Image (cartoon, rainbow, N blue to C red):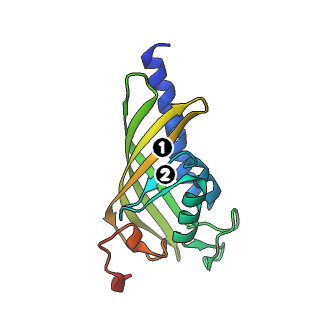
């Protein structure tokens, strides 16, 4: 197959993973987040690395604050709560290996959260991902999260210092 066709197909498959990640978090479907990392892991901004379905699922379930329809914090239950966020992924750049079986993918993210009828940007930064292709298709092998634009994440995360190691906890 022509390399250009392989790259085009790969880009569509990789974008599908990127956008499913954002949708899964925003809709309160942390099982899907875990599934997206079943063959990979996440390196958090503080350097912690979690790998595989269960570890990623538990991290996201435990760190994110979920809300019911009345905006009351609630324990995570798939489909019954959400973090009231919108993750916007943009500026996607791909660098494929010669065989088009591996890629470094860099992108920007912005996170909006709506609480109390206020829609606020709470975070922004970059994802640096490694994707690999196997017999099952393209999957994310590693995601590094670089949180570079800090807003008030106290309504989004139980422990904001996990994504901002320099956070002043007294201000949270």
**Residue drawn at 48 percent across, 21 percent down:** 6
- The answer to whether residue 166 is above or below residue 104 is below
Q: Which residue has dot 1 on it?
A: 141
- The answer to whether residue 6 is above or below residue 145 is above
- CB-based contact (under 8 Å), mark 1 and mark 2: yes
Classify mark 1: helix, strand or loop: strand
Image mark count: 2
Residue nearer the viewer, 88 or 40: 40
Q: In the rendered view of the protein, which quadrant contains the C terminus? A: bottom left
Q: Which mark is residue 30?
A: none
The answer to whether residue 11 is seen in the rendering is: yes
| Residue 130 placement, left or right of 22 | left
Image quadrant in which you'd find residue 7: top left
Q: Position of residue 104 (x, y in %)?
A: 38, 38
* Neighbours of disc 1 within 10 Å: few (<14), some (14-19), many (20+): many
Q: Position of residue 146 (x, y in %)?
A: 34, 57
Q: Which residue has dot 2 on it?
A: 41
Residue nearer the viewer, 63 or 152: 63
């Amino acid at each position: 197959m022509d390399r250009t066709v392989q790259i085009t197909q790969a880009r569509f498959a990789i974008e599908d993973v990127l956008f499913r990640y954002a949708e899964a978090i925003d809709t309160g479907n942390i099982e899907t987040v875990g599934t997206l990392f079943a063959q990979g892991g996440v390196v958090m901004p503080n350097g912690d690395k979690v790998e595989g379905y269960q570890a990623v699922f538990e991290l996201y379930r435990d760190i994110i604050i979920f809300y019911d329809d009345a905006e009351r914090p609630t324990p995570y239950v798939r489909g019954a709560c959400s973090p009231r966020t919108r993750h916007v992924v943009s500026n996607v750049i791909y660098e494929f290996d010669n065989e088009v079986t591996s890629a470094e993918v860099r992108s920007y993210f912005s996170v909006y959260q709506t609480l109390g009828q206020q829609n606020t940007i709470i975070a922004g930064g970059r994802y640096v991902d490694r994707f690999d292709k196997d017999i099952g298709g393209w999957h994310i092998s590693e995601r590094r999260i670089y949180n570079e634009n800090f807003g008030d994440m106290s309504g989004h995360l139980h422990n904001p210092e996990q994504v901002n190691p320099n956070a002043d906890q007294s201000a949270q």
